[in-house]
Amino acid sequence: ASAAASRVRGGPPAFGAALGVFCKVMGAWEDLGVTVDAVHAHVLSAQEALLRRMPEEGPLSRRTLLPPQDGPARSHTLVFRQGSAQVAGATVSLLAKHGVRVDARGELVRVGFGFGHSAGDVERLLRALEECFGAASPRPEEANNPTVPADAGAKAALGLVPMGHGAGEKLCE
């Protein structure tokens, strides 16, 4: 048989083990009273904590959020346009150096939230953004004060000055 034919042969996909794990987890969640609605509410809460303190402009900003949706219509992944795949890649690398895991697809950087994320993860992301880009996000007690603009030096190092686009990430390692 040809190499191509041998790649096509095979039986059904081997998903039995994964399905078994899924069923065990779902059973444990049911025993604990965890529901899909509760997980979704938890994720939206983490997102709202981030979005409340996110700058209007600059890296990982309200301006670069795609699409700008409210609460329940939003997926568990926030997506931010970076302007180019090169800028997205540089953003991924820089945030990774600060202990933040980032997912980029083309010119987009994604912040993924899930069941295991906490308020501490949101704080860690905000600190990393401030360290990487100089984007000062207001603390909860400063929520009524204007946001300090992103540091031009940090943005210029990544080529972000002309585009003014930011970064996103997955929070837990």
Image (cartoon, helix red, strand yellow):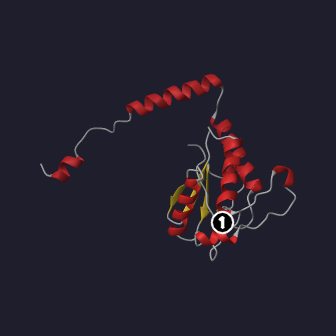
Could you say which is closer to the camera, residue 157 or residue 19? 157
Looking at the image, the residue that sits furthest to the left is 1
Amino acid type of the residue tagged 1 in the rendering = Thr
Looking at the image, the residue that sits furthest to the bottom is 162
Q: Is residue 108 above or below residue 37?
A: below
Quarter residue 144 falls in: bottom right
Disc 1 residue crowd, few under 14, some 14–19, many 20+, Cα 10 Å: many
| Image mark count | 1
**Percent position (x, y) of residue 97?**
56, 54
Q: Residue at x 18, y 50 (%)?
A: 5
Q: Residue at x 70, y 45 (%)?
A: 46
Q: Residue at x 86, y 60 (%)?
A: 145
**Percent position (x, y) of residue 63?**
69, 67
Looking at the image, the residue that sits furthest to the top is 31
The quadrant in which the C terminus is found is top right
**Percent position (x, y) of residue 83?**
57, 71
Could you say which is closer to the camera, residue 77 or residue 173? 173
Relative horizontal placement of residue 17, taking residue 132 as reference (left or right) = left
Relative horizontal placement of residue 103, taking residue 113 as reference (left or right) = left
**Secondary structure under badge 1?**
loop
Residue occupied by mark 1 = 64
Q: Is residue 9 above or below residue 149?
A: above
Q: Is residue 91 above or below residue 171?
A: below
Quarter residue 55 falls in: bottom right
**Percent position (x, y) of residue 94?**
57, 59
